[in-house]
Image (tube, rainbow, N blue to C red):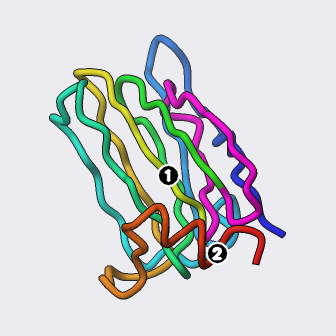
Amino acid sequence: MKNPYLINFDSIGSRQLGFISVAESLKNIPFSIKRVYWTYYTPHDVIRGGHANIEKEMILIAIAGNISVEIETKHGVKSNHLLNTPSNGLYIPPLSWHNMKYSHNAVQLVFASNIYSESDYIRDYEEFKRKYINQ
C-alpha cells in the first residue's frame, strides 16, 4: 500500500554559490517519469486539483513560494502537507484525491508517471468516495 510521503532531495552547493537538487527516475523518484509540467501565476485564492488519478503517480515540488496540499487516499486517510522548499517533493500515489492552494509567488513542478489522459481523471468527489474509498 502506497501512501503520500515527502521526499528530501539532496541540496548540493553552498549559500555563496547556490544549490542544485537532482531528481532521477527509479532512484529518488519511485517511478519512470513520463511527463513533466509546472504551474505558476496561480492566484492565492484559487484551489487547484480537485481530482484523483486512477493510475498516475506524481511528485509535487514547490520550486518557489508555498503550496498547501490536502490529500485523501483510497483508504480514507487524510493528510495535509506544506511544500515550501525546492529540495522537498511530495509523492502522491494513484487514487488519491488532492487539492492544492498556492502563495502568490508559487511555482509548482510536477513529475508524473503517465502522459495526460482524461480517462485517468476522477473529477467528482462523490464518485471517488463511492467507487474507490476502502474498496
Residue type at mark 1 is: His
Instruction: State the residue position of label 1.
Output: 98
Image quadrant occupied by the C terminus: bottom right
> Residue at horizontal 58%, vertical 64%?
24
Circles 1 and 2 in contact, beta carbons < 8 Å: no
Quickly name the residue at label 2.
Answer: 132
Residue 25: x %, y % from top left: 59, 71
Image mark for residue 74 = none
At which x and y percent is residue 3?
Answer: 75, 57
Q: Specify start and end residues of the magenta stretch as a single range.
A: 73-94
Q: Residues within 10 Å of mark 2 (few under 14, many from 20)?
A: some
Front-most of residues 42 and 64: 42
Q: Up-down: is 121 above or below 9?
A: below
Find numbered disc 1 in the image and state the secondary structure of the residue it sits on.
strand
- From the top left corner, tell me how far across and down residue 62 is, in percent: 43, 36
Q: Is residue 93 left or right of residue 113?
A: right
Residue 34 quadrant:
bottom left
Residue at 42%, 83% (x, y): give it.
Answer: 120
Q: Does the segment drawn in magenta span residue 98?
A: no
